[in-house]
Image: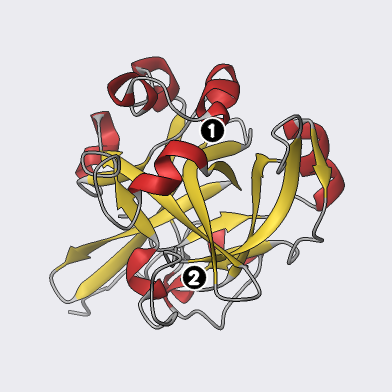
Amino acid sequence: MCGRYATTRNDPDLAELFDAVVITPGPGPSWNVAPTDPVPLVRMSRSRDARVLDTARWGLVPPWAADMRGAARMINARAERVASSPAFAASFDRRRCLIPADGWYEWVRDGSVRQPFYMTPADSSPLAFAGLWSPWGPEGVLTCTIITTVALGALATVHDRMPLVLPPGRWSSWLAGGGDPIEQLSPPSAEALAAIEIRAVRPDVGNVRNNGPELILPPPPRPVETTLF
């Protein structure tokens, strides 16, 4: 799954990157995005003639849901079931989005220690996660989810799932909706995956109250134990 990620570019930079028009100011940079946080996303306009940069609550809530209490459990949608899932199928057909990111976090347990890792392009280039959005309630609160797929290559040593990362050449077809689900949900190329760095980072990211660029830095070296004779 993808339960934490970083997205630190500002609205003007994202608008230029995705050739989109800002319609809702974003929440600002975050190095520790957590479930139900507001996040930037790129979707098609209502008339579907332009891309817009909008803000949504992370955790998709279907229009038929009685309330938003289940949002934290809907932050991810599995690629294998998204086209047929009652919660996600309608959005997969016509409410797709791109979710800008710099990288994402996963944890690996080593005995009693849970070591966080940060997956990010080695050249610091931006990522676009395949996502879905949906309005909820009388006020049309915008909510979203990140599609995940089976982790491949070295990423599988950290976690068995990964976000579905879309290269720029697939952005337009993804946002258009429809199409062959197998093709639309195909994983990134081996070349793209090889460009992802897997970096051990500081345990501070485990606390949602912590936020800042220091979270993506390598942890300080452990003290070396010495034995006195």
Residue drawn at (39%, 83%) of the image: 69
The percent position of residue 142, horizontal first and vertical second, equals 60, 64
Left-right relation of 225 to 126: left
Q: Sequence-wise, which precedes: disc 2 or disc 1?
A: 2
The answer to whether 30 is drawn above or below residue 46 in the figure is below
Which quarter of the picture shows residue 18?
A: top right
Residue kind at label 1, given as amino acid type: Ala
Q: How many marks?
A: 2
Identify the residue position indicated by label 1 in the image.
Answer: 122
- Give the crowd class for mark 1: few <14, some 14-19, many >=20 residues within 10 Å: few
Q: Which residue is disc 2 drawn over?
A: 34
- For marks 2 and 1, give the CA distance: 23 Å
Q: Quadrant of the C terminus?
A: bottom left
In the picture as drawn, the residue positioned furthest to the right comes out as 12
Q: Is residue 4 above or below residue 70?
A: above
* For residue 53, side relative to residue 6 (left or right): right
